[in-house]
Image: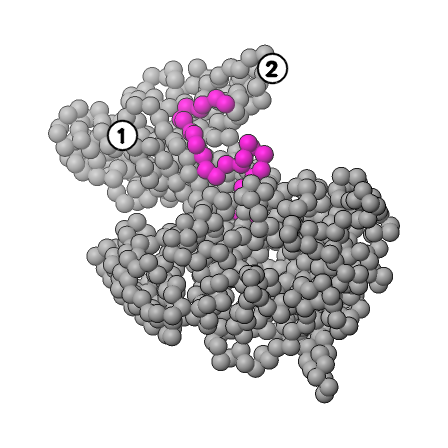
Amino acid sequence: MAEEEKSAAKRNSTTKKSSVKKASAKKTTRKRTSAKSKATTAHIVGEAPAPVIERASSDQFGRINIMDITPTAENGLFPARVELGEPFPVTAQVFIEGRTKAGATVSVRNPRGHEVERVAMTCTNPGLDRWEAMVRIGEHSDLKPWDADYAKVKRQLGEWHIVIEGWEDTYASWLHDAAIKVKVNDDVENALESGSQLLARWAGAHDSKLSADDKKILRKAAKTMADKSLAPEDRLAAATADEIQHLHEEHPLRDGLSESNPQRFRVERPKSSFAAWYQFFPRSEGAHYDDKGKIVPGDLKTSLAGLERAAAEGFDIVYLPPIFPIGVTNRKGRNNSLVAGPDDPGSPFGIGSELGGHDTVDPLLGTMDDFKMFCERAHELGLEIALDFALQCSPDHPWVKQHPNWFRTKPDGTIAFAENPPKKYQDIYPIDFNADMEGIEKEVERIMDLWIKAGVTIFRVDNPHTKPVRFWQDVIAAVTRKHPETLFLAEAFTRPAMMRALSYAGFTQSHCYFPWRNTKEELEEYLPETNGEHGFYQHNTFWPTTPDILTAYLRDNGIAGHAVRAVLAAMGSPSWGIYNGYELIENRQRPGFEEQIDNEKYEIKVRDWGKAGKYGIAELLTSLNRIRAEHPACRSYHNLHILESDDENIVAFLRQTPAELTGTGKADTVIVAVNLDGHDAHQSIVHIDLKEFGFDPDKPLKVHDELTGHDFEWGADNFVSLAPWADVAHVLTVVED
């Protein structure tokens, strides 16, 4: 160590933060604060405070021991991902030797390395030294990338760090022993004198970030404690006053301060995880029958009505299937038939014709100028546009001639169409990435740049799990480097490892298996799973249906079933979505398949939106989106708790965000109870451990049903009766007295 560094070390106070320095290539050494410091050599009355022990490498302990931090990046490579302002839990084991008491703090540090907030941790399991805190990085915002003030949001995005700070809680350790000594009259004077000195030293601690008034409080208490003319009980009382306890909670004296290794967090923009999606096919929006009974398709201009409907129902994102030209060769007919009729429009996933490929608007829908106008209107309504990006081609796609090495050729010289035996997709050529992945990457980056400039802010990627993960990692990195506001949704119904890998690669949201989790047992397992540790990496979006997913539950449970699944999706995940037609109870299955009959992927739908009102689902969707927007508890993947209920058809859960993280100064609690049976009424007792969630067990818990407007008083055990012909669910918010 250079002489000037040694000199600086001598001047460091005991509240200096520890640091992790680069280890020597030859050996690792442990360094302490200078041996000449007052804390270690000067004669003082009372015990010397714990010194800071510098860490020369990341695997060394500090003076305080910190282990088992959650969340933690896998192998230190992939940071946990949170939306700006999203509350999330941080836990760690923090402990010190012997009877000495420890304290712990979460230090939140921005991409420039500056601490912006300290959050006190609470010891929730003393036997295991487990400390916890709810943390948020930045402030929640609903600003969109095109808003004038979006720069304020953009400045907060990027890689942040949290550092767990462990410290000797000298005050708590002293108070524990001093209170006993005063009570039994044992060595009282030494105990009180030590406390007086401790308070005086606390008042001078720079690390505690005390105001001038705070310092006066501590020094006054120290003076009172040193006054031998007072009774010991009165002297001790000066150190236990409410104002001192408050300072201990908010601005503690932190001796022996020790830092963990920094934990990485990728902070993403609004709607990266808290979002409500609405899907429609432009060719069906505004479609109608002419006077001869022939369907006149909709287009991007008539689709403006779909934007209006999505906005009126409170959705944030409008998602369009591919809007590119559709191939003619092997075009699919109705219900995926191999023979297309003369008026069959084909599947929009059979991309590409002589009119163009992925960089072209289908002329039947309009022009690129029409699409830009469509996006502009969406933005005026506060809606983002998500575009489906299916990386596959019709046999007529320009790439087939321009880049034949991008496709796999059979021994007979023909290009292999897509298949998943026994399923065959004769209208699609899959891409082969083995010959020229770099060239494909550059082309995809070019195309995405084109659509982003036209107004797209999100890509819903079809079947990304059938392409190399590294491909997506490269593409997403390149696109977001140029357009950091761009988000990606993975349509990946596949193995957990692949879904996790895609999230590591940069996909901000993901489809998931929610449509097939319908029983109480399944939901009580699935909801905590998707709203727990997994939520730091894979942000699952709950969709009750899609154009090609229609489960038996929705087929068999009618309007009530649609209401149930909407409540579970909207309240069970921060991100959810519906496919239009949901409001009209389109629930007829194609025989032998879990998909709609007369599937919109293969034909144009003519819908009578005037009938939506009689089902009440549109009204319900609007209410659910309003509740989500008004209640911060709905915005996190990390605050869901299953509540015990007695009936096998009643599932109940609670979401809660503490007061310090809501932005309102009040805790926000949402309680959901749902009857899963679409045919019969069910009753149950729903149990809540009131104390666990910060409620007074001796007072009635006032709750308001956001769906019906009714008010109730709840307690530890609550009778619930829900019927499919009345209320299928309660969505209750706790009302402050």
Q: What element carries label 1?
A: helix
Front residue (pair 697, 41): 697
Mark 2 — residue?
25
Residue bounds of the magenta highlight: 59-84
Q: Where residue 527 sits: x, y (%)?
A: 43, 52
Count how many numbered circles sit on residues in the image. 2
Front residue (pair 40, 319): 319
Q: In which quarter of the image is residue 37?
A: top left
Q: What element carries label 2?
A: loop
Of all residues shown, which one is farthest toward the left?
A: 184
Q: Which mark is residue 613?
A: none
Residue at mark 2 to residue at mark 1: CA–CA distance: 42 Å
Mark 1 — residue?
174
Left or right, 653 with respect to 178, comes to right
Q: Where residue 228 sits: x, y (%)?
A: 19, 30
**Does 67 appear in magenta?**
yes
Front residue (pair 499, 13): 499
Residue type of the residue flagged with mark 2: Ala
Query: Pointer 2 and pointer 1: residues touching (CB < 8 Å)?
Result: no
